[in-house]
Amino acid sequence: MRKGRFEADGAGLYYEVRGSGPALLMISGAGGDAGYYDGVAEILSDAFMVISYDRRGNSRSTGRTGTPMDLAVQAADARALIDGLAGGRALVFGNSGGAIIGLTLAALHPEVMTGLIAHEPPAVNVLPDGDPGRGFFAELAALYARGGAPAAGRRFAETTRGEGTYRWPGELWKRFLGNQDHLFGTEWSGFAGFRPDETALKSAPFPVVLGAGAEDRGTYYARPSIEIARRIGAPWTEFPGIHMEFLRHPDRFAAALRVLATQLHSRDGDVPALWKGAAQ
């Protein structure tokens, strides 16, 4: 593994690169960093050049400002890393908030992408009017305003199925806790306001695949992937496990991601029917 900091618009983005071959950029979700994908990146490094990073203001990256951050900034950071570390083109995987960033990247900077795998984007604004999931971001914003990061963070964990059933690596957990004020004070409004650019995603010059974990059926953060896939006419697939399966069972998650990433990279044909889950 090689690591370093990449300068992007006033921030030093900490990154890790493993392996060689086609570039696969992995974008972490809210509060997370490159450490989310340590296990998966090691496993996939025999076939891909896996790039993971700490998003602006998180963990080992700089650029924390305390003012709300637009998703376009997050997408521009991802583009800068692809330009600087992957020769300008990469397959992108994102989980949760990272999937929202991936969808934003696909809409704003499609020229740097060879494909997108968006795993459980919590894009609650695509859920039907009156769906209780639509109030998630507002609920946690109010909790943060009243009780700070500890109150909002506890509620966040309570809403994420499977959390508490396995142990996080100690250093990753410490960094995660250190990112909470940045998450709720700086990034939250961008994630809360996200609506996918359906026109841009429909016309993307590369394959886009949405997906969610088998154990997350019915959750507010899994259902939007099905709705987005339906709206843009993209395939949808079921991954193994929970929202953070790449931490709980990285080998199992990597096996599923390897098949899909290889197919998207090879482009020998359309994504096979095996991967086309029902999008209704």
Image (tube, helix red, strand yellow):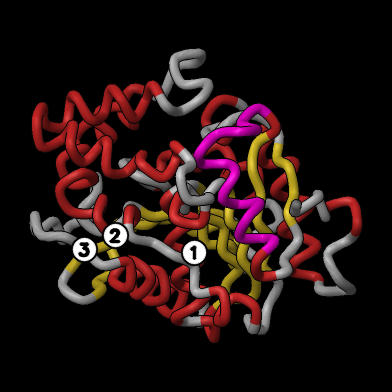
Type of residue at label 2?
Gly
Magenta stretch holds residue 213: no
Type of residue at label 1?
Gly
Q: Which of marks 3 and 2 is nearer the N terminus?
A: 3
Type of residue at label 3?
Met
Q: What element carries label 1?
A: helix
**Residue 42 image point, x, y percent:** 58, 43
Query: Residue 73, relative to residue 190: is it above or below?
Result: below
The answer to whether residue 125 is left or right of residue 181 is right
Q: Seen from this angle, which residue lies furthest top?
A: 165
Residue pointed to by mark 2 = 190
Residue pointed to by mark 3 = 69
Q: Nearer the viewer, mark 3 or mark 2?
A: 2
**Residue 96 image point, x, y percent:** 47, 47
Q: Give the range drawn in magenta.
A: 215-230
Query: Residue 159, relative to residue 180: is it above or below?
Result: above
Residue at x 50% of width, y 13% of height: 165
**Residue 120 image point, x, y percent:** 55, 46
In front here: 226 or 253?
226
CB contact under 8 Å: marks 2 and 1: no
Residue at x 65% of width, y 36% of height: 213
The answer to whether residue 255 is left or right of residue 178 is right
**Residue 185 image point, x, y percent:** 15, 48
